[in-house]
């Protein structure tokens, strides 16, 4: 596993392991790098089935331990809105920048990541980027004030949140008889 240079902040992005590509996230990171980001940080993206980055180092998939290492080493963590990755970040005291996958772009089968991201953001556990402009602003802020994207969060506090969210999603997708 290639590690970042010690003197260069690391922006690490993870699209997760879903079979749907998440080109939008990679394009936003590439665009940020093109517009000067590459002068201030190194970027590595776990790209899954998405097209590889033009500007960042792309790794299709990472073993769990390697993913955890990148999450710990990153100055800035950019993630899809899947509960597993978001919860891993929270467990490690990382406040990720989350770009929820959207069904209208073929990034997922539904918009459950949007609902989950909204709930986690309302508790101050993540930052959500719905637009490229928000994404750029959050990445820039995370590099100028990295401590704002760190938090001591005991996982026990999150289990109840995840359980409530799972119940909420189950009720949303439960077939209704008319």
Image: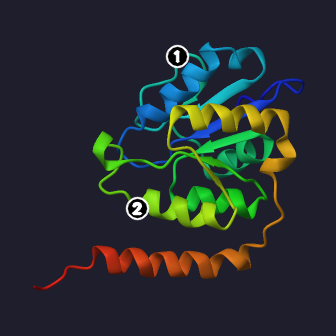
Residue 109 lies, in percent from the top left, at: 29, 54
In the orientation shown, which residue stands out farthest toward the left? 178
List the residue tagged with mark 2: 112
The answer to whether the residues at label 1 and label 2 have Cβ atoms under 8 Å apart is no
For residue 162, above or below residue 83: below
- Taking the image as shown, residue 148 lies to the left or right of residue 176, namely right
Image quarter (top left, top right, bottom left or bottom right) of the C terminus:
bottom left
Please name whichever residue, 132 or 25, is drawn nearer the observer in this view of the structure.
132
Residue 75 lies, in percent from the top left, at: 79, 38
Image quarter (top left, top right, bottom left or bottom right) of the N terminus:
top right
* Eye-nearest disc, 1 or 2: 2
Distance, label 1 to label 2, CA atoms, is 29 Å
For marks 1 and 2, the one nearer the N-term is 1
For residue 176, above or below residue 114: below
List the residue tagged with mark 1: 54
For residue 143, above or below residue 32: below
User: Regarding mark 1 in the picture, which secondary structure is present there?
Assistant: loop
Please name whichever residue, 162 or 123, is drawn nearer the observer in this view of the structure.
123
What crowding class fits label 1: few (fewer than 14 Cα within 10 Å), some (14-19), or many (20 or more)?
some
Instruction: Give the image quarter of residue 169.
Output: bottom left
Residue in the image at 72% along x and 46% along y: 71
Please name whichever residue, 31 or 58, is drawn nearer the observer in this view of the structure.
31
- Taking the image as shown, residue 167 lies to the left or right of residue 137, namely left
Residue 56 lies, in percent from the top left, at: 61, 22
Residue in the image at 70% along x and 50% along y: 68
Residue in the image at 31% along x and 40% along y: 105
């Amino acid at each position: 596993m290639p590690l970042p240079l010690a003197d260069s902040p690391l922006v690490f992005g993870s699209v997760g392991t879903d079979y749907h590509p998440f080109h939008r996230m990679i394009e936003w990171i590439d665009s940020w790098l093109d517009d000067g980001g590459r002068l201030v940080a190194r970027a590595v993206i776990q790209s899954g089935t998405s097209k590889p980055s033009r500007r960042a180092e792309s790794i299709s998939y990472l073993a769990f331990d390697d993913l955890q290492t990148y999450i710990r080493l990153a100055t800035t963590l950019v993630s899809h809105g899947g509960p597993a990755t978001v919860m891993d970040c929270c467990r490690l005291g990382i406040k990720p920048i989350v770009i929820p996958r959207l069904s209208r772009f073929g990034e997922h089968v539904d918009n459950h990541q949007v609902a989950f991201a909204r709930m986690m953001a309302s508790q101050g556990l993540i930052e959500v980027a719905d637009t490229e402009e928000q994404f750029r602003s959050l990445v820039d802020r995370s590099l100028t004030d990295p401590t704002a994207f760190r938090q001591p969060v005991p996982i026990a506090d999150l289990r109840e949140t995840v359980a409530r969210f799972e119940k909420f999603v189950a009720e949303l997708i439960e077939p209704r008889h008319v």
